[in-house]
Image: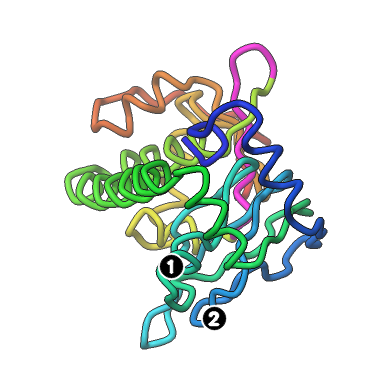
């Protein structure tokens, strides 16, 4: 679910045509937490990471977002500072609209219900994830986080696989799963040994989506024997 999927056909193209095309290189910052919401970004192509910092300076990766998203929309509509930092995981093609132009467009097209629905669904999804992690095993926690990422930004890989570009270091993935780095690595290895995942340095391939989702619900799965050379690093 994203902005493009919830709007009528042709509206996404109309929106991005009203903005200024801009390319963001990999690792560059699209939005910075705390800054003034002067503009909104429509993500045409690429992948971004949403990170939120707290008062102590710690950072939490909230989610990855892909094409079809509008970034910074709530700050622009409410006139509030950015609530998170958004950085490019890979090269991003975008359309940048001034906040006042975006607000007029939303009002004219009566898009308030769409944005409200999207915002509420994301908040609910985040709360469901946090609640479920409290009752899952380490492997179940990682499976649930990876399953959510696959649903959000996964791309088909082969006949049945799903490629997930993580765009984050291992500690970030562990933090998303509310666990230590060592526990997350062990859980990833367990899922790989079971034939559910194949791990790469900054990506992974979901080989069995149904078993991944089952593991993310806390269901048991049997681990296989990992072969030499199978273990990778996220």
Q: Residue furthest left?
A: 135
Residue 51: % across, % down? 50, 66
State whether residue 160 is above or below residue 193: above
For this view, does 17 lie left or right of residue 205? right
Q: Which residue lies furthest to the bottom in this view?
A: 56
Secondary structure beneath label 2: loop
Asked if the stretch drawn in magenta spans residue 163, the answer is yes
Examine the image and state in which quarter residue 28 appears. Answer: bottom right
Examine the image and state in which quarter residue 176 appears. Answer: bottom left
Q: Which of 199 and 52 is in front in this view?
A: 52
Mark sitting on residue 36: 2
Mark 2 surroundings within 10 Å by alpha-carbon count, few (fewer than 14), some (14 through 19), many (20 or more): some
Asked if the stretch drawn in magenta spans residue 178, the answer is no
Mark earlier in primary sequence (2, 1)? 2
Secondary structure beneath label 1: strand
User: Which residue is at 51% across, 51% downward?
Assistant: 106
Q: Which of 205 and 2 is in front in this view?
A: 2
**Magenta stretch bounds:** 158-168
Mark sitting on residue 34: none
Residue 98: % across, % down? 65, 67
User: Which residue is at 66% across, 46% downward?
Assistant: 15
Residue 136: % across, % down? 23, 43
User: Which residue is at 54% across, 81% downward?
Assistant: 36
- Label count reads 2
Q: Name the residue under label 1.
A: 60
């Amino acid at each position: 679910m994203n902005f493009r999927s919830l709007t009528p056909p042709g509206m996404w193209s109309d929106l991005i045509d009203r903005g200024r095309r801009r390319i963001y290189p990999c690792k560059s910052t699209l939005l910075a937490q705390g800054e003034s919401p002067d503009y909104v970004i429509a993500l045409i192509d690429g992948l971004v990471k949403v990170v939120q910092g707290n008062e102590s300076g710690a950072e939490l990766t909230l989610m990855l977002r892909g094409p079809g998203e509008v970034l910074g929309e709530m700050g622009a509509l409410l006139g509030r500072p950015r609530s998170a930092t958004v950085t490019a995981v890979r090269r991003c093609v975008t359309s940048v609209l001034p906040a006042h132009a975006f607000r007029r467009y939303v009002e004219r097209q009566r898009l308030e219900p769409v944005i409200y629905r999207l915002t509420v669904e994301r908040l609910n999804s985040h709360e469901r994830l946090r609640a479920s992690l409290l009752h899952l095993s380490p492997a179940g926690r990682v499976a649930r986080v990876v399953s959510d990422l696959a649903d959000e930004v996964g791309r088909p890989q082969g006949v049945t696989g799903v490629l997930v570009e993580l765009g984050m270091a291992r500690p970030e993935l562990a933090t998303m799963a509310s666990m230590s780095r060592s526990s997350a690595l062990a859980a990833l290895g367990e899922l790989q040994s079971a034939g559910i995942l194949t791990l790469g340095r900054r990506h992974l391939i979901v080989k069995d989506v149904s078993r991944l989702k089952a593991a993310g619900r806390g269901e048991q799965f049997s681990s296989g024997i990992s072969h030499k050379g199978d273990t990778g690093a996220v």
